[in-house]
Amino acid sequence: MGMSFPGGLARNAGGRATEKFREAEQEAADSAEARLLRHHPRVRSVPQIWHQDSAGNWNAEGATAQWEVYCEQCGDSDGPADRQFPPARELRGPYKTRHQARHAAARHERNT
Ligand SMILES: [Zn+2]
């Protein structure tokens, strides 16, 4: 009656498991937060023409021989590079080769 030995053991084991689970949960939350804070620059060819629709969305048309790096986390709102604020505009480039653009994107990702 009252205290049950096996039940107590089970509770202890459960407590340790819960603690471990909480640690793992916290680690997962931390890395998810880090992932959200990181920048995810993308490399694409510089479009020939930009069109803005009535809703304000930009649509790219054609491709030039140049490349650019687009980073949403830097506040890039898409559309022409000269419409961006300095940090996003600088990152855009343009770059002469895809290789150069990829290097710039990788460097940017490492530094954010
Ligand atoms: Zn960025």
Image (cartoon, rainbow, N blue to C red):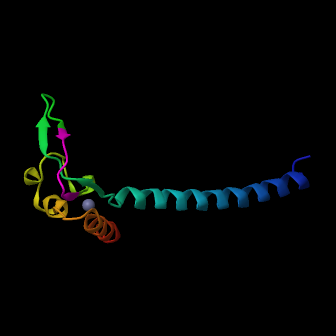
Q: In the current view of this chain or complex, which residue is farthest to the top?
A: 54
Across and down, in percent, residue 3 comes to 87, 52
The answer to whether residue 27 is visible is yes
User: Where is ligand 1, by quadrant?
Assistant: bottom left
Q: Residue sitting at 19 percent across and 41 percent down?
A: 60
In this view of the protein, which residue sits in the foreground, 9 or 95?
Answer: 95
Across and down, in percent, residue 24 comes to 60, 60
Residue span colored magenta: 59-68
The answer to whether residue 112 is visible is no
On screen, residue 112 above or below 59: below
Quadrant assignment, res 70: bottom left
Image label count: 0
Q: Residue sitting at 18 percent across and 56 percent down?
A: 65
Across and down, in percent, residue 47 comes to 17, 47
- Image quadrant in which the C terminus is located: bottom left
Across and down, in percent, residue 38 comes to 35, 61
In this view of the protein, which residue sits in the foreground, 83 or 10?
Answer: 83
On screen, residue 78 above or below 18: above
64 in the magenta segment:
yes
Quadrant assignment, res 15: bottom right
112 in the magenta segment:
no
Q: In the rendered view, does 4 fall on the left or right side of 80? A: right
